[in-house]
Amino acid sequence: MKSLSYHFVADREALVSHMLCLKRQRCPHCCCGGSLNRHSFLYGNDPARSGACKLRGQRVFCCDRGRRGGCGRSFSVFLAEVLPRHSVGASILWGLLRLLMARVSLKGAAELIRAPFALETLYHLVARLRGRLDAVRVLLFGRCKPPPCSRADPLVQTAAHLGLVFEDVECPVAEFQQGFQRAFCG
């Protein structure tokens, strides 16, 4: 499986701050210091406005020119609200998971949160998340034991565990990505 290298920051201000101290950081691929440079911004579809783009993060390049000794590879620094490779945001996904925990169907949850996506998009996202539950649950278990849950659905059990680990935050999915530096949906 191809290893993807991501880094997550809380918001735009944290992204700017992170970019200002790139020279003091090491490349996640080759561990070379002093070789990281800003690259292009990452934009994606803005679900709130039709045809509009939204800042998702920024690319970082490990320079291999001259005597820098870098590897020439790049990686992405994402805003924590962004789910890499998905237009759906972390807050929309968390709203969907909360409704699934409340025994609402996926179709009903999509209608309640007024998701600006086709229903198939949410079915695809949930299926992708179901395929990744083992990795998510291992990380969450490292923080605390899962809460008792009467539901047999592993997705609902994982959502309840996520809510317990990050109980005092607005969006536990974004906090998961920032806290573990891992993409929630893979």
Image: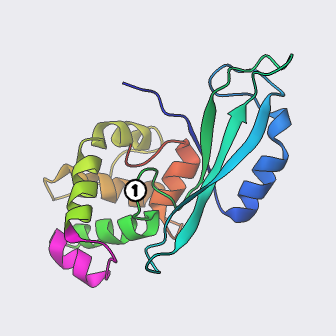
Left or right, residue 105 beside residue 134: left
Q: Estimate the x, y position of residue 169 in percent, counting from the top left.
A: 53, 66
Q: Estimate the x, y position of residue 181 in percent, counting from the top left.
A: 56, 42
Check if residue 127 falls in the magenta segment: no
Q: Secondary structure at mark 1?
A: loop
Using the rendered image of the protein, determine whether residue 104 is visible from the camera's viewpoint: no
Q: Estimate the x, y position of residue 167 in percent, counting from the top left.
A: 47, 63
Specify the quadrant of the image occupied by residue 24. Answer: top right
Q: Which amino acid type corresponds to the residue marked 1 in the rendered image? A: His
Query: In this view of the protein, which residue sits in the foreground, 52 or 103?
Result: 52
Identity of the residue drawn at 17% across and 78% down: 108
Q: Quadrant of the C terminus?
A: top left
- The residue segment tinted magenta is 103-119
Left or right, residue 54 beside residue 135: right
Left or right, residue 136 beside residue 102: right
Mark 1, other Cα within 10 Å: few <14 / some 14–19 / many ≥20: few
Q: How is the image coloured?
A: rainbow
Q: Quadrant of the N terminus?
A: top left
Using the rendered image of the protein, determine whether residue 101 is visible from the camera's viewpoint: yes
Identity of the residue drawn at 40% across and 40% down: 141
Query: In this view of the protein, which residue sits in the foreground, 175 or 108?
Result: 108
Check if residue 115 falls in the magenta segment: yes
Identity of the residue drawn at 85% across and 19% down: 66
Q: Is residue 53 above or below residue 136?
A: below
Identity of the residue drawn at 26% across and 64% down: 122
Q: Quickly name the residue at label 1.
A: 86
Specify the quadrant of the image occupied by residue 173. Answer: bottom left
Q: Is residue 15 above or below residue 93?
A: above
Q: Estimate the x, y position of residue 34 in percent, counting from the top left.
A: 84, 28
